[in-house]
Amino acid sequence: MAYPYFQAVELLRQHTPLVQCLTNSVVMQFTANVLLAAGASPAMCDTPEESADFAAVANGVLINAGTPSSEQYRGMAEAIRGATAAGTPWVLDPVAVGGLKMRTDFARGVVDKRPTAIRGNASEVTALAGLGAGGRGVDATDSVDSALEAARRLASRTGGVVAVSGPEDLIVSPDRVTRLHSGDPMLQLVIGTGCSLGALTAAYLGACRGSGLSLHDAVLAAHAHMGVAGQIAADRSQGPGTFAVALIDALHGVDVEDIRTLSTIQEDLG
């Protein structure tokens, strides 16, 4: 079956979307390399004085409060303001939400700003919706299926797409739920794979804007791209160190046929 999200992969390479990344200091370089390898252009512009203006010219924006400072909180708020005013799609990655009050309050507050997409693990999504206490730091302690109700509530509240990452990914919109089977456990052993997936999601949303493809399919394509690259990289590596390098190579080389043959999707009915 030819799903529309296959077309999104080609759109990403054609348009080289500019992605403004307001992300945590631990993963900044890795995230930039992921975007470049996949076919996007990263910009780590997060100062309060520039964030709103940059969000207006970017094709997509990532909001990731992984290692926040007071200045970065202000920068993220300004980027959201600029993106909203310009209609730039933006992604909220609620890193470690639930366990720490300030980041939890911030993330829950910006949900009302209607992010185009939310991407997190099961515990983060559940806590963001107010249905759980979060995981163990950035690690999920809840199953993907247990986060389905939380994802549905957030999608209904924002009108956007909620992606729950795990052994299988759930992509949830107000009127659609898709399960994506791809990836490899080795992805959990390299810092930044989840955070950079949020940036890749912003890239796909930017590339697909105005194309006629749904937001849902754009988010699905981003997760399939990362998951399939993870599978290819795992086959080429001997451990986490070589996997990290192989993942960058695989993200660059993945094509539509790889995604067609190495990923499986299932639409939930009813």
Image (tube, rainbow, N blue to C red):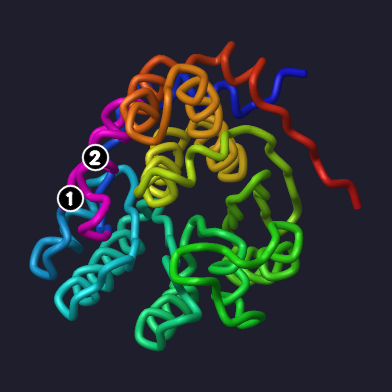
Magenta region includes residue 232: no
Is residue 166 shown above or below 129? above
Residue ID for mark 2: 32
Pick whichever, 21 or 86, lies toward us.
Answer: 21
Residue drawn at point x = 35 percent, y = 49 percent: 191
Give SS at disc 2.
Answer: helix
Q: Residue furthest left?
A: 49
User: Magenta stretch?
Assistant: 24-44
**Left or right placement of residue 127 versus residue 190 in this view:** right
Taking the magenta stretch, the answer to whether it contains residue 33 is yes
Judge by depth and name the residue closer to the eye, 4 or 261: 261
Which residue occupies 44% across, 70% down? Answer: 137
Residue 15 in sight here: no
Marks 2, 1: nearer the viewer:
2
Determine which residue is flagged by label 1: 44
Hey, what amino acid is under mark 1?
Met
Q: Are marks 2 and 1 in contact (CB under 8 Å)?
A: yes
